[in-house]
Image (cartoon, grey):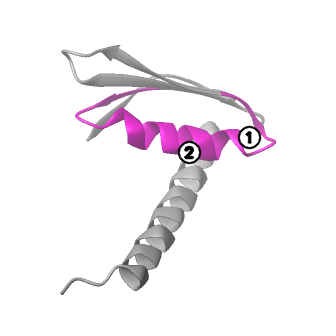
Amino acid sequence: MHAQILSSAPKELNLSIKNTDVGILYIIQHELLKSSSIDFAGVIVKHPLTNECWMKVNSKNKPIQEIKNATQTAIKTVDDLKKLFNSKIKVN
């Protein structure tokens, strides 16, 4: 995964993310939208053949910090899900 800032302002951040799965970005978007300080969080696939996605975040706080927080929450949620699967599924 390669992320690059396309544009940045105190309350807005636009990112280009290459070589990633858009599903991961949708999970981060979902976590962002749970926060009351987020005005907008969007993800688009720029073009299917370029494997590039764009993410835009408008926030009352620093958008980069909001993305970091949402990513940490997503990681914890997925880790909890992994533990649940491992505890319930036994392989013979």
- Closer to the camera: disc 1 or disc 2? 2
Identify the element where label 2 is drawn.
helix
Identify the element where label 1 is drawn.
loop
Name which residue lies at 60% across and 41% down. 30
Q: Which residue is mark 2?
A: 67
Relative placement, left or right, of 66 versus 85 is right
Percent of width and height locating residue 81 = 47, 68
Relative placement, left or right, of 31 versus 38 is left
Question: Which residue range is magenta in the image?
Answer: 15-40
Q: Which residue is mark 1?
A: 61
Q: Earlier in the sequence, mark 1 or mark 2?
A: 1
Other residues around mark 2 within 10 Å, as few (<14) / some (14–19) / many (≥20): some
Instruction: Tell me if residue 88 comes above or below residue 30 in the rendering.
Output: below
Q: Seen from this angle, which residue lies furthest front?
A: 92
Evaluate if marks 1 and 2 touch, with contact meaning CB atoms under 8 Å apart.
Answer: no
Percent of width and height locating residue 72 = 52, 60
Name which residue lies at 64% across and 42% down. 32
Instruction: Tell me if residue 9 comes above or below residue 35 in the rendering.
Output: above
Relative placement, left or right, of 11 versus 21 is right
> Of residues 76 and 90, which is closer to you in this image?
90
Instruction: Tell me if residue 53 comes above or below residue 66 in the rendering.
Output: above
Which quadrant of the figure contains the C terminus?
Answer: bottom left
Percent of width and height locating residue 59 = 71, 33
Q: Amino acid at mark 2?
A: Ile
Q: Amino acid at mark 1?
A: Asn
> Of residues 26 and 9, which is closer to you in this image?
26
Which quadrant of the figure contains the N terminus?
Answer: top left
